[in-house]
Amino acid sequence: MLRWTRAWRLPLRGLGPCCLSSSRVPVAPSSSGRSGAEPRSVLLSYKLLDGEATRPALVFLHGLFGSKTNFNSIAKALAQQTGRRVLTVDARNHGDSPHSPDMSYEAMSQDLQDLLPQLGLMPCVLIGHSMGGKTAMLLALQRPEMVERLIAVDISPVETTPSSNFPSYMAAMRAVDIPDEVPRSSARKLADKQLSTVIQDMAERQFLLTNLVEVDGRFVWRVNLEALARHMDKILAFPPRQESYPGPTLFLLGGNSQYVRPSHHTEIRRLFPRAQMQTVPNAGHWIHADCPQGFVAAIRGFLA
């Protein structure tokens, strides 16, 4: 079975079968979480596109199993169209960012509380999808002075219910078995075939397979499946908060998605009293992939 990897801040030149061996990613040592400890930040991997320093930067946070490369084309388009700086970030235990036994939203928020001041990106426009949206909401509630305005993409500040398939995804990923020294061209096909017994949707399998990387002739998962599995209940939940965020907030929903429900609206209004909602027609949960033009247009409209 495949192991997961510890991804240091080394550049992976994209995602896909042509680039799986573009960096050496050490296998993570086993570690155990520390209960009751304060969140300890990690040095996140990021990509910053230059722009006008006088205007709040756009900061993108990806969802579970994603990476900063999910927003490559979106980030370039918005940098060109708005003239702003655009930051894309790999969450801990994802992409090229380090692994950590702690996968709480408090820890992910702390990572950003350390990173954004270092880059001079305060306050910023914080845009988070799914898990990244919950991190963005928590950061805005904890440190409103760091967030000029907030966009939560197809997620709400309540427990996520449609994602009961995520544990089965992880079980399927951990069960993938690729023999050593298999040619790169064959490894993804073999992994895809094994995942297909559990995950019928080809687009979802291809998304998960962006996490398959080659290290020293072996194929491994660069996401920290152990930490994700241990903290899945926390990832699907949202930390209880009493304070509200006073800034402008957009909840951007996919027209074909059921992640944000009418029953969530009361809590949304309590925590984000200036919230507005907008739906992108014909888009599912991954709005930026299903309807990139509508996604960019919604962001630009909210910035106007």
Image: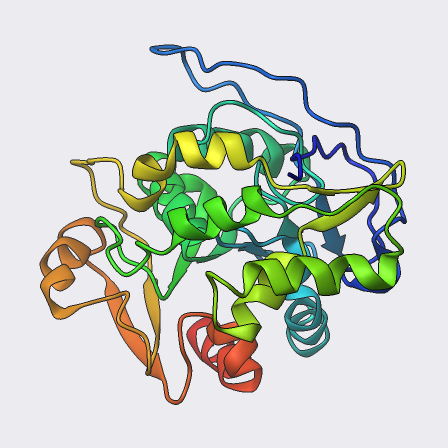
Residue at horizontal 49 percent and vertical 73 percent from the top: 201
Residue 12 in percent (x, y) is at 82, 49
Where on the picture, by quarter, is residue 86? bottom right
Q: Judge left or right: residue 83 versus residue 13.
A: left
| Farthest-out residue, bottom | 282
Task: Report the residue at 33% width, 82% height from top.
Answer: 256
Query: Which one is nearer the viewer's eye here, 173 or 127?
Result: 173
| Pick the front one: 168 or 34 | 168
Q: Is residue 6 above or below residue 127?
A: above
Is residue 59 rendered to the left or right of residue 178? Answer: left
Viewer-side residue, 123 vs 220: 220
Asked whether the viewer can see residue 26, the reply is yes
Quadrant of the snapshot with the N terminus: top right
Where residue 204 appears, as percent x and y from the top left, is 53, 67
* On screen, residue 194 above or below 25: below
Residue 85, can we see it? no
Q: In the image, is 178 to the left or to the right of 265? A: right
Residue at point 79% right, 28% down?
A: 26
Residue 66: percent from left, percent from top: 57, 54
Q: Position of residue 134 (x, y in %)?
A: 37, 48
Q: Which quadrant of the structure image shows residue 273?
A: bottom left
Q: How many marks?
A: 0
The colour style of the image is: rainbow
